[in-house]
Amino acid sequence: MNNEVFEYIGNLGLKLDQIQLNNFVDVLFKFYISSAKTQRARGKDFVLTMMDYVRLHNPKYLHVLARQFKMGRLHDFKKSKKAMVLSWQPGMIRSGLPMSIETACMCSRQQSRRNCYYQKGEKMDDKTKAKISKTKTGHTTDAETIAKIKEANKRAYAEKSDAEKAEINARKAQAAKERWARYHAEKIVLFDAKA
């Protein structure tokens, strides 16, 4: 570990003596190594340096970690819901880019899970589609749930502006035209095949 990390953390005024500061940095280094192992085990390139890892932490959060460290509760705190974890920025996990200062962030575990969801416009691979299909196969939705979904959709549509409603209706009309065009084309092909 280079002196830059010690200097950066030392300048934050964490109210730790030199021995505590050294031990605190050692613990942060262990967290960094653990994060690197986790990402590499998932087949991701990990090019984030220790200094980048420390800089991703908000200075106020480093003060919280230092306080927990002084009380001997840092490891328990890191397992709690309040703890921040190293994660990917939204939409970056499947970008093919390595985990670096540009693609990583510190966030809550819950936010980390959301960041790793498929983002709007992102294409799913065949393996993911098959996994989703398998979980949905044979699943039936009861009438009460369907009624609740319909009611929620009606409320959401009613809250939209006239311009948004017009755009939605135009999209639905275009999709219906395309669907009927495909249907008629398939029907003509079937008819020609029979003849």
Image (tube, rainbow, N blue to C red):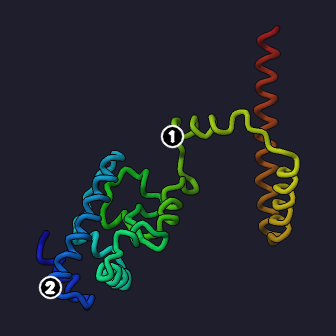
Residue at the outermost front position: 72
Q: Nearer the viewer, mark 2 or mark 1?
A: 2
Q: Amino acid at mark 2?
A: Gln
Q: Residue at x 41, y 61 (%)?
A: 88
> Quadrant of the rendered structure where residue 187 is?
top right
Whether 158 is drawn above or below 14: the answer is above
Residue 18 numbered mark, or none: 2
Mark positioned earlier in the residue sequence (2 or 1): 2
Binning the other alpha carbons within 10 Å of mark 2 as few (below 14), some (14 to 19) or many (20 upward) gives few
In the picture, which quadrant includes the C terminus? Answer: top right
Tell me the SS state at disc 1: loop
Q: Residue at x 15, y 78 (%)?
A: 4
State left or right for residue 125 relative to residue 75: right
Residue 73 appears anywhere in the view = yes
Residue 152: horizontal and vertical position, in percent? 82, 61
Residue 17: horizontal and vertical position, in percent? 18, 88
Residue 59 appears anywhere in the view = no
Q: Residue at x 80, y 21 (%)?
A: 188
Q: Nearer the viewer, residue 52 or 1?
A: 1
User: Badge 1 is on which residue?
Assistant: 125
Q: Amino acid at mark 1?
A: Asp
State left or right for residue 23 relative to residue 192: left
Whether 90 is drawn above or below 130: the answer is below
Residue 179: horizontal and vertical position, in percent? 78, 38
Q: Residue at x 54, y 40 (%)?
A: 128
Tell me the SS state at disc 2: helix
